[in-house]
Image: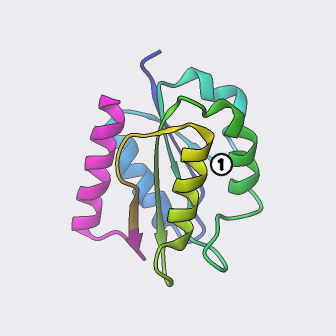
Amino acid sequence: MDKTAVVYWSGTGNTQAMAEAIQKAAGADLFTAAEFTKDMVGNYKAIAFGCPSMGAEELEDSEFAPMFEDCKPALKGKKIALFGSYGWGDGEWMRTWEADCKTLGATLISDSLVINETPDDAGLEECKKLGDALAEA
């Protein structure tokens, strides 16, 4: 089991652009939140999850959050990475998400990646670095 996956939800395309850049660098399988299930977690040595900040700095609640909630029991000991875009706030959603993942017993393979709005060239380079870390996990 040396496969990696990138699982994301995107409303505006910003987090999708990040997911695609990470996937390309990692050579990972790419899934939307609607396509990924808890039964798939065991097929991957490492998974990068991506979701933008929504509402009052929280995960998207109709597709991504339910999928992630379902996956939680399978994430103990799993190598994961977190990423997402935001348009306001100070990154509280990512800090909350990181803390939740640590409580689950997941292993964060790198610092989480947050990008304001659409990723520029520097942001895409950060996505590539995250993809490289995912591939090496």
The residue under the point 56% across, 60% down is: 51
Q: Which residue is mark 1?
A: 33
Find numbered disc 1 in the image and state the secondary structure of the residue it sits on: loop
Q: Nearer the viewer, residue 30 or 47?
A: 47
Q: Residue furthest top?
A: 1
Residue type for callout 1: Ala
Residue at 56 percent across and 68 percent down: it is 93
Q: Give the camera-side residue of 91 and 61.
A: 91
Q: x%, y% of residue 21? A: 35, 51
Residue 71 versus residue 120 in the image, above or below: above
Give the percent coordinates (x, y) of residue 72.
Answer: 68, 40
Q: Is residue 17 magenta?
A: no
Percent x, y for residue 70? Answer: 75, 41
Q: Is residue 136 left or right of 13 when viewed as pictured?
A: left
Q: Main secondary structure of the magenta part?
A: helix
Residue 25 visible at all: no
Q: In the picture provided, is 130 more to the left or to the right than 6?
A: left
Q: Residue at x 64, y 69 (%)?
A: 58
- Quarter of the C terminus within the rendering: top left
| Residue 132 painted magenta | yes
Q: Which residues are magenta?
A: 115-137
